[in-house]
């Protein structure tokens, strides 16, 4: 099994919380700026119309030359391109002012109207876009047209939009920087916890999850897990110690028992019923001693200190030696035993004798369970820079439901119950694979039988 990698990028909790906060802040800022824009625009629009109405009332008090003079004086205070006027006679003929034509679509009703196209002229002193306009009749029967450009409103709109843009930018940029900084420390701690957890899962029960001085939620959880690990380690050591002691202590009396039985067999007459019974008892004693030796072997392999003696080794020579060793046995059983190797394979870091023992156990099982006339293949593969060792056969295979159980101690598959063995061979293989940090997979081969793959890419959590 393998532990999941720490969350990356936006998947971490801190990233999601910061993204949610930033989104809510941006949405709220947009709503706030929208309301502000609406309120300010409405206020300025009313202010412009009110100012235009005041000018209308002011000029309605004058007539004749006084009106012309008042309009001329007002132009000196007006802003070019914003305010303009035009004075026309009763027949709507031009008299004075910058506005020489009455804007199209302007009703002559004395009310303020908003026009989309104010004046069709290239004169920069005239408002050419949207404007407010009013046509009022003077005491002399003349028509006075007053216009005011709405461009000032659009200028305020641009200011508000710029403020919104910079507000959102100044929210997102610190948010991204904060997201990056805030997620680094938790992810660094999670990776440290993961490394310790992987070592624990790999069998090093002495490891503990790291703690910091902050005593936050992660430290509280790590402290709880460490307390559980201490209890589990104590119980595991007690159970392991009891099993190892039983296996070790019984080995001596069993050896003495076998020696006594052997003496009794030698003293019994050859071919007598007593001698035949003693042969059966001696065989059972040998079986018990072999099982105890297997248990002690597994316990020895579970000692992680053996990794200190690992060296770089060539898998090609290892596999060639295994093929030469098992070729006579396979031929005696009427099997075809093939070795498939490339010119070279990536080197392995490990104990050569233990790896020889592991692959030898796999080959021994394949040869034992493959019927005469079948085939066994030992294959080495360069899988992207690391070595994969595969053992394939044309035997009955391993049912999918039993592929995990076959690595348990004393487990024997239903198809192999008629074969000799103690159910410890694959348990020893699993212990060797775990010690090296490799992975072991079970599947179905192209020959129709079992396919056992030893992936020699070292990881912290080997699979068995």
Image (cartoon, rainbow, N blue to C red):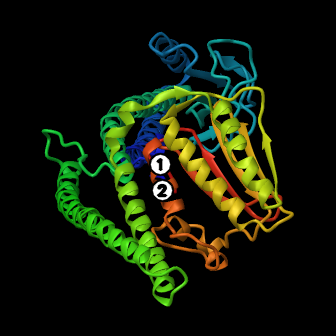
Give the residue at mark 1: 432
Give neighbour class at mark 2: few <14, some 14-19, many 20+ (Cα, 10 Å). Answer: many
For label 2, the SS is: helix
Most extreme residue toward the bottom, as rendered?
273
- Residue 408: x and y, percent? 47, 67
Q: Which of these two is toward me, 211 or 179?
A: 211
Q: Indicate whether 418 appears above or below 35.
A: below
How many numbered marks have been drawn onto this rendered protein structure?
2
The residue drawn where x is 71% and y is 39% is 380
Crowding around mark 1 (Cα neighbors within 10 Å: few <14, some 14 to 19, many 20+) is many
Q: Residue at x 47, y 39 (%)?
A: 41
Camera-side residue: 97 or 122?
Answer: 122
Q: Is residue 236 visible from the viewing direction of this image?
A: yes
Side (left or right) of 61 relative to 184: right
Q: Is residue 25 above or below residue 1?
A: above
Q: Which residue is mark 2?
A: 428
State which quadrant residue 241 falls in. Answer: bottom left
Using the numbered discs, state the Cα–Cα distance from disc 1 to disc 2 in whole angstroms: 6 Å
Secondary structure beneath dot 1 equals helix
Q: Are marks 1 and 2 in contact (CB under 8 Å)?
A: yes
């Amino acid at each position: 099994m393998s532990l999941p990698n720490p969350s990356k990028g936006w998947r971490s909790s801190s990233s999601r919380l910061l993204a949610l906060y930033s989104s809510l802040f941006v949405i709220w800022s947009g709503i706030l700026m929208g309301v502000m824009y609406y309120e300010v625009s409405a206020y300025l629009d009313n202010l412009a119309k009110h100012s235009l109405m005041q000018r209308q009332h002011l000029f309605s008090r004058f007539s004749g030359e006084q009106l012309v003079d008042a309009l001329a004086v007002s132009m000196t205070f007006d802003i070019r391109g914003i305010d303009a006027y035009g004075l026309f006679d009763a027949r709507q003929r031009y008299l004075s002012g910058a506005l020489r034509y009455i804007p199209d679509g302007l009703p002559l009703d004395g009310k303020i109207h908003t026009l989309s196209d104010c004046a069709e002229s290239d004169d920069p002193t005239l408002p050419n876009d949207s404007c407010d306009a009013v046509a009022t009749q003077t005491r002399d029967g003349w028509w006075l047209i007053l216009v005011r450009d709405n461009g000032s409103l659009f200028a305020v709109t641009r200011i508000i939009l710029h403020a919104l843009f910079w507000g959102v930018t100044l929210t997102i940029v610190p948010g991204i920087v904060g997201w990056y900084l805030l997620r680094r420390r938790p992810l660094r701690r999670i990776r440290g916890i993961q490394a310790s957890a992987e070592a624990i899962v790999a069998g090093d029960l002495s490891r503990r999850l790291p703690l910091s001085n902050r005593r936050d939620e992660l430290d509280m959880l790590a402290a709880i897990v460490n307390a559980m690990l201490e209890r589990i380690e104590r119980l595991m050591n007690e159970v392991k110690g009891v099993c190892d002691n039983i296996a070790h202590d019984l080995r001596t009396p069993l050896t003495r028992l076998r020696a006594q039985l052997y003496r009794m067999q030698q003293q019994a007459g050859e071919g007598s019923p007593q001698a035949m019974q003693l042969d059966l008892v001696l065989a059972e004693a040998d079986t018990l001693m072999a099982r105890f030796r297997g248990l002690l072997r597994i316990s020895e392999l579970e000692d992680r200190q053996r990794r200190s003696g690992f060296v770089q080794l060539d898998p090609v020579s290892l596999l060639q030696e295994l093929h030469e060793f098992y070729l006579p046995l396979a031929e005696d059983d009427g099997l075809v035993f093939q070795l498939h190797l490339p010119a070279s394979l990536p080197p392995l870091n490990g104990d050569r004798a233990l790896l020889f023992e592991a692959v030898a156990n796999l080959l021994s099982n394949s040869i034992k369970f493959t019927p005469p006339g079948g085939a066994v293949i030992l294959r080495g593969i360069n899988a992207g820079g690391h070595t994969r060792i595969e053992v394939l056969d044309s035997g009955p295979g391993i049912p999918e439901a039993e592929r995990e159980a076959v690595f348990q101690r004393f487990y024997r598959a239903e198809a192999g119950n008629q074969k000799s063995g103690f159910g410890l061979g694959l348990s020893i293989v699993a212990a060797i694979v775990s010690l090296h940090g490799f992975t072991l997979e079970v599947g179905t081969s192209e020959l129709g039988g079992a396919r056992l793959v030893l992936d020699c890419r070292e990881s912290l959590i080997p699979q068995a």
